[in-house]
Structure formats: structure tokens, C-alpha cells
Amino acid sequence: NAGVTQTPKFQVLKTGQSMTLQCAQDMNHNSMYWYRQDPGMGLRLIYYSASEGTTDKGEVPNGYNVSRLNKREFSLRLESAAPSQTSVYFCASTPRMRTGDQPQHFGDGTRLSIL
Amino acid sequence: RKEVEQDPGPFNVPEGATVAFNCTYSNSASQSFFWYRQDCRKEPKLLMSVYSSGNEDGRFTAQLNRASQYISLLIRDSKLSDSATYLCVGYDRGSTLGRLYFGRGTQLTVWP
């Protein structure tokens, strides 16, 4: 049982390039999330998808777009990468939102560097 | 101001020591709390949920003080393998997002 799978694990981009981070979960969870983690900042929510077919902005959505392709997959796109987007990106899922006792299941993370 | 505030540490303790972390939260409507553990360059993983009455799991004890709006994590008989960053997390079901708020994390190093 893979849980939450993110690809790629590492990526180096040049400023202005675009790329898509992929995330898939095999736990039949309804809700999925994208976070970024920077030193001294903790985890910050970029976008989330409460259920298939819906997406909403989190704390730091600027510069990103998302697609909830189906129940399993939730992708994060950087249209024009900037050095400020250098970070570790985590995808997570929960059975559904508004259930406070459900732990978030995280993927391994994608380490993204933008030069 | 962040919803959840933690002392970033680092805490450096010898094996066998008892160490405690505190975390304060600003939103009194927050209804659930958790401690996550994150190893270096790894994803966060749930360590414990925090209940009003306090809960214990082996060497770990978590407590919630709603009056003072803080959460604590106590680790007894520290092991080398406890070295990690501990994230305090709050959940606000009443918020628009109904989502989790992560603290910045407290770094713990246990030395032999």
C-alpha cells in the first residue's frame, strides 16, 4: 500500500520555467492538500481540494495552480518559476475535511530548487 | 501572528532525560490538536492526538490546557531515536477551511 506518492522527488529549474508536481493517493481519500515547507516557516498550505471536482486557495496560493484530476490525483503547477518558490513541497490527504481527528497522510516530498 | 506558536529550540538533551515542549494557540475556537514528528528531510508523521484530559502513549504524554490555550508534549527517558522536529498542530472545524494549522516545529537532539 503506497499511501501518498509524489513525483518527482527532486527538481532543479531555471527562473521562468514551468513544471507540474504530481501527487496520487491510493487510500480513497476525499481531501487532498499541497503544502510548502521553508526553514523557520513551518508548513504552509498552498491549495487544497476538499473533494473531487473542487479546489480552493490556502495561505500562499500566488504563483501556483492546481488540478484535481480525479479522486486519486492532485497536481500542483508552477507556470513561471521564481527563486522564491525554492522549497520542499508536500502533498497530503485525509478521508475528508472537517473531521478533526483524522491525521494527514503525507507524501515523501518534492525538493524543488529554482536558480 | 501564526495560529500556532512553538519554541523552535533546539533542545539538546542526553539520553534518558525528560524533555517538555509547549505550544500556544491563538484561536480559542480550535477544537483538536496533534503532535506530528518530522525526521530530517522526511515527511511529517502523526505522533499523537491531544485530548482535553491528557493522553499517554508509552514515554510520550500530551496535554491540553484550554484556559491558557497551550498544548504540551512530554518525552520521558529520551532515546537517540527521538531526535527529530516536533510539530504542534491545531484544527479549527469552525473555520472556512476546516483545516490544520502547523506550528514551525521544535527541534530535539538527543545525545549519547
Image (cartoon, rainbow, N blue to C red):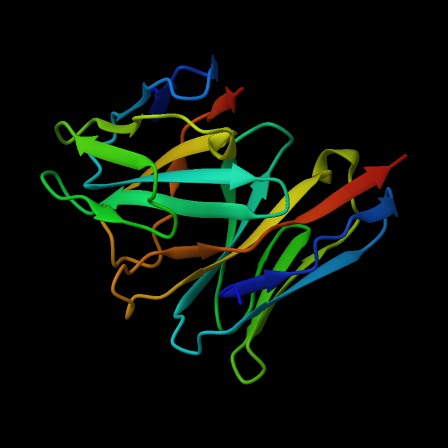
Count of numbered circles on the image: 0
Query: The C terminus of chain B appears in which quarter of the rendering?
Result: top right
- The picture places residue B52, in percent across and down from the top left corner, at 49, 73
Q: Is residue A112 left or right of residue B8?
A: left
Image location (x, y in percent) of residue A93: 31, 38
Residue B78, by quadrant, is top right
Residue at coordinates 14% horizontally, 31% vertically from top-left? Answer: A71
Above or below A63: residue B30: below
Front in this rendered view, residue B9 or B31: B9
| The one of B23 and A81 positioned closer to us in this rendering | A81
Residue at position x 57%, y 48% from top?
Answer: A41
Instruction: Tell me where residue A8 sits by quadrant.
Output: top left
Name the residue nearer the viewer: A102 or A31: A31
Please give left or right for residue B111 compared with residue B99 in the image: right
Farthest left residue?
A53
Name the side, left or right, on which B22 lies relative to A54. right
Residue B98 placement (x, y as % from top left): 28, 60
Image quadrant in which you'd find residue A19: top left
Depth check, front residue: B89 or B16: B89
Where is residue A107? Give x, y as percent. 41, 28
Specify the farthest residue to the bottom. B67
Rendered view: B110 above or below A71: below
Determine whether, in the image, residue A108 is placed left or right of residue A62: right
